[in-house]
Amino acid sequence: MSIFDQRTDATLAQLEAEGQYKHLQMLDSPMDAVVRLRQADGSYRDTLCFCSNNYLGLANHPEVVEAGIEGLRKYGAGTASVRFICGTFSPHEQLEETIGRYMGTESSYTFVSCWNATEALFPTFCEAGDVIVSDELNHACIIDSMRLTPVIKKGVKKKVFKHSDMESLKEKLEEAQRDPDISGQVWVVTDGVFSMEGDIAKLAEIRSLCDAFDAKLVVDDSHGHGVMGETGRGTHEYCGLIDKNGMAKVDYFTGTLGKALGGGAGGFIAGPKRGTELVIQRGRPTLFSNALPVTVACSANKAIEILMREPERVKKLRDNTAYARKKITEAGFEVIDSPTAICPIIVGDTAKAISMSKRLLELGVFVIGFGFPVVPEGTARLRIQLSAAHEKAHIDELVGALKKL
Ligand SMILES: Cc1ncc(COP(=O)(O)O)c(C=O)c1O
């Protein structure tokens, strides 16, 4: 057996022994409030889904599905090439215009995922002498993009501030100001909504600090799009960072099309045109990798149009979230408080979180338990995610199942 085969078998066996092996579920239906889930005996069972990021219930919306089908019929599967060689289809151009309008930015550029967009952003934008200052709980794609940047562009520095701690951010910015090696651009990056805690960044305070230190603000709002703010524009809308002309007071966004905005896949960078142009000219993921499939471009464009046309979906999600938080708390569980659609119930022990999630599945409710190392030791949790696709009766069923635990 080769070295790789031996160590991989050992790793997989260890994961299984420690109860951390991820057994993927199989669905035989579209994503919705109720999904058909494969059981151990091979049969399928209708199960309430409370673990998807399908926040607005658009993943299976007839218009979203139809737009994807039309795109496939009209354009086929793709250009079989990267965009700068073979060009792109008009749905990509349309989608990028729609994203800019929705976010309140001058332009946007799409990628096959938000991971890819984030991996393009920092290594392309940063140069020697720049520094990236990041919240310690930022998403893994930001962490990895920060790790990659100094490998591609030597002389880029990194700093991490304590989660949502404005004093800590200010300290890091002051350190950067004193450092003679940091003579270029300062970048501050934060998630809009933090995916494991469900809390939100203090964007207005972060903006003020960025202005005071001449720093550019980058926000990954993958869990904020379609969820936060009166019309679901995102955490910047919730925090009052939209000017009177409807433009975002955030320098650059990264975001996903794989959650509220259609749920298929895809990501984007949104911001001033000079930045998106630089990514087109110089971004390694744009120069060496294919575009978002055109079917996804069509369905994501339709999903954003529906969101802008039907803000009542955002309200329904907000109402569902408030109702669920109230009912779960009344049932005696501790839920981390926030206005987002992510409701983590802290249970402490990893094995306990996993066994609770297994029991919920037996009771017909699909909720995932997250433990160490995804979250800090001792803070294992059940992460409940609400959707506008849920009705109150679904939430009552969820709470009934929780009570049986
Ligand atoms: C905050 C955040 N950013 C980025 C991503 C990655 O998005 P994508 O699936 O489009 O790569 C996720 C997905 O889990 C996320 O939660």
Image: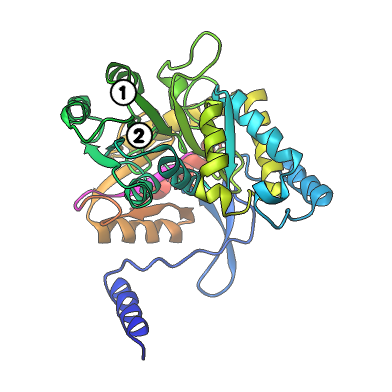
Q: Which residue matches tag 1?
A: 206
Magenta-tinted stretch: 377-387
Colour scheme shown? rainbow
Q: Position of residue 75 (x, y in %)?
A: 80, 49
Between residues 364 and 297, which one lies in front from this camera angle? Answer: 297
Amino acid type shown at disc 1: Ile
Q: CA distance from mark 2 to mark 1?
A: 9 Å
Q: Could you tell whether 213 is left or right of 36 in the image?
A: left
The residue at the point 55 percent across, 34 percent down is 276
Q: Quadrant of residue 33?
A: top right
Does the stretch in magenta take in 190? no
236 sits left or right of 99 in the view: left
x, y percent for residue 335 = 31, 38
Badge 2: how crowded within 10 Å, few (<14), some, or many (20+)? Answer: many
Asked if the residue at tag 1 contacts the one at tag 2, i.e. Cβ–Cβ closer than 8 Å, the answer is yes
Q: Which residue is mark 2?
A: 190
**Residue for point 42% across, 28% down:** 322
Quarter occupied by residue 329? top left
Where is 162 relative to 51, above or below?
A: above
